Amino acid sequence: MDSLCCFNYSQGSRSSCSAGKGKSHEGTAKYGFSLIKGKANHPMEDYHVAKFVQFQGRELGLFAIYDGHLGDSVPAYLQKHLFSNILKEDEFWTDPSTSITKAYERTDRAILTHNPDLGRGGSTAVTAILINGRHLWVANVGDSRGVLSRRGHAIPLTVDHEPNAERDSIENKGGFVSNMPGDVARVNGQLAVSRAFGDKNLKSHLRSDPDVRSAEIREDTELLILASDGIWKVMSNQEAVDFVNKIKDPQKAAKQLAMEAVNRESKDDISCIVVRF
């Protein structure tokens, strides 16, 4: 991984951010990533995975953004364990969707079991598995997104899990959704997503099962963007695709996309991965 220092635009001091790149050994896919700490007065809470690996005779591209809240322990745990848990499932090759769902829920149970070692925080997640450069499986809990570009058109592969959209589920479990003026909807007045890993104090009212979608990588598929909500709070799916499609190098594209979010005054931690096919 390449690393660099960048100017902390919130406090006028030096702060670490990171960027890097890699490529498939068997195909033409390349990736780049960029993470920038936001304005909040706490350490960076985003983690990522971006790599190609050989697994049981196939090449897998493994990509993820984990956006933590109330600390970075849960996203750090996910970075180490979630993909390995997915690939341990016996039916991964025959039924990837079921395997991913089982692994998400099993990982969440493990996180709750490790509490208080992992603290009271939690994390959203968006993950992507690229099989032999052709078959893509994307899953998410929370509001980080996966967006595909096909002939320049943004194709969302995730749906944000917002409290208002899943109000019935939350209320059926004894929780409530607050809608204070000037603020976003929150579960029990606290969390701005309705699905997440961890968050033990709210878990009885939250879900951790992911939405899972698949896509074929065709000749007209240009790229995939995975990003935390630090991007999506200031940019639409199509705006991000339009911006990135102009930049052929995926590392440069990821870095410039993250900086564009900064320029648009995003206050959150900003993390993104660009995979160009």
Image (tube, rainbow, N blue to C red):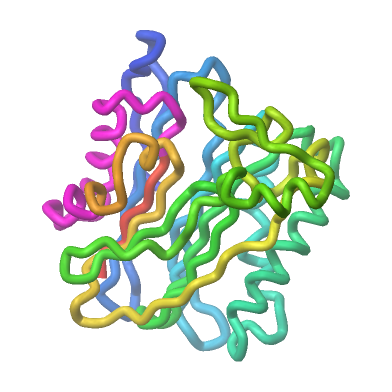
Q: Does residue 234 sit above or below 43 in this rendering?
A: below
Q: Main secondary structure of the magenta part?
A: helix
> Which quadrant: the C terminus?
bottom left
Residues rendered magenta in the picture: 241-270
> Does residue 18 show up?
no
In this rendered view, identify the residue nearer to me: 37 or 139: 139
Point 25% across, 74% down: residue? 28
- Residue 250 in magenta stretch: yes
Point 20% across, 51% down: residue? 244
What is the x, y in percent for residue 249? 18, 55
Q: Quadrant of residue 109?
A: bottom right
What is the x, y in percent for residue 112? 83, 47
In this rendered view, identify the residue nearer to me: 277 or 15: 277
Point 63% across, 52% down: residue? 166
Point 26% across, 42% down: residue? 257
> Does residue 14 show up?
yes
Q: Residue furthest left?
A: 246
Counting every numbered tag in the picture gives: 0
What is the x, y in percent for residue 48? 50, 48
What is the x, y in percent for residue 34? 36, 42
Q: Does residue 276 sit above or below 87 in this rendering?
A: above
Q: Residue furthest top?
A: 12
- Residue 196 in magenta stretch: no
Residue 94 falls left or right of residue 116: left
Q: Does residue 60 sit above or below 50 in this rendering?
A: below
